[in-house]
Amino acid sequence: MKSILAMFFAALLSFSNQVQAQATTGNQLLGYCKEYLKDVPADLFNAGLCGGLIDGTRGGVDGGLLLAGKRLDEMNKFRQYCVPDNATRGQLARVVVKHLESVPENLHLNAQVLIFNALKAGFPCN
C-alpha cells in the first residue's frame, strides 16, 4: 500500500500546479486559507486558491486510488483519512490552518502533501 501511495504522490506532485511556475508551499497555503476564512475576503482569488487546493488534493487522492484499481467501497481504508459527508469547505480550511500552524517547520513543503497530512490528522478513520 505504501508503494501505491508513494507512486500516487509522485504523480500528483509532478502534475499539480501546472498553471504556476512552481509548486505552492505551505507558507502560501496558510495565507490563502486565512484569507478564505475571513468574513469578507479582501482577495477572492487567493481565498479561492485555498478551497481549490483542498478540493484538488482530495480529488487527486481519490483519482489515484481509482487508477490503482481500488473500489469505491475500499477508498477510506487506503485514503488514510475519512472526511464526513457533511463537512463544509470552511471546516476543511480550518483543519488545514490548524495543522499548518502546528508545524511551522514544514511550511516550506508542498501544499498538497501538507493538506493530505492535515486531513489525516483532522479526520482519522475509525
Image (cartoon, rainbow, N blue to C red):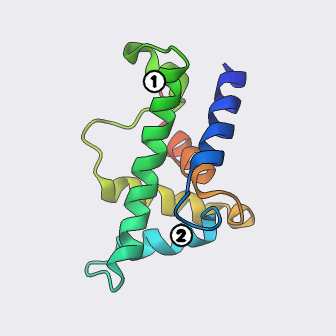
Q: Nearer the viewer, residue 11 or 88?
A: 11
Residue drawn 56% across the image and 44% down it: 116
Residue 23: give x, y in percent of width and height: 63, 61
Q: Which residue is mark 2?
A: 30
Residue drawn 42% across the image and 39% down it: 59
Q: Nearer the viewer, residue 28 or 22?
A: 22
Query: Do the CB atoms of the residues marked 2 and 1 lie less than 8 Å apart?
Result: no
> Which amino acid type is shown beneath numbered disc 1?
Asn
Residue 101: give x, y in percent of width and height: 59, 66
> Which element is circle 1 on?
helix
Which quarter shows the N terminus?
Answer: top right
Q: Which residue is mark 1?
A: 76
Residue 20: give x, y in percent of width and height: 56, 66
> Which element is circle 2 on?
helix
Q: Badge 1 local density, few (<14 within 10 Å), some, or many (20+)?
A: some
- Which numbered disc covers residue 52? none
Residue drawn 36% across the image and 67% down it: 48
Number of numbered labels in the structure image: 2
Residue 30: give x, y in percent of width and height: 53, 69
73 relative to 12 in the view: left or right: left
N-term-proximal mark, 2 vs 1: 2
55 relative to 110 in the view: left or right: left
Q: Is residue 100 above or below residue 118?
A: below
Q: Badge 2 local density, few (<14 within 10 Å), some, or many (20+)?
A: many
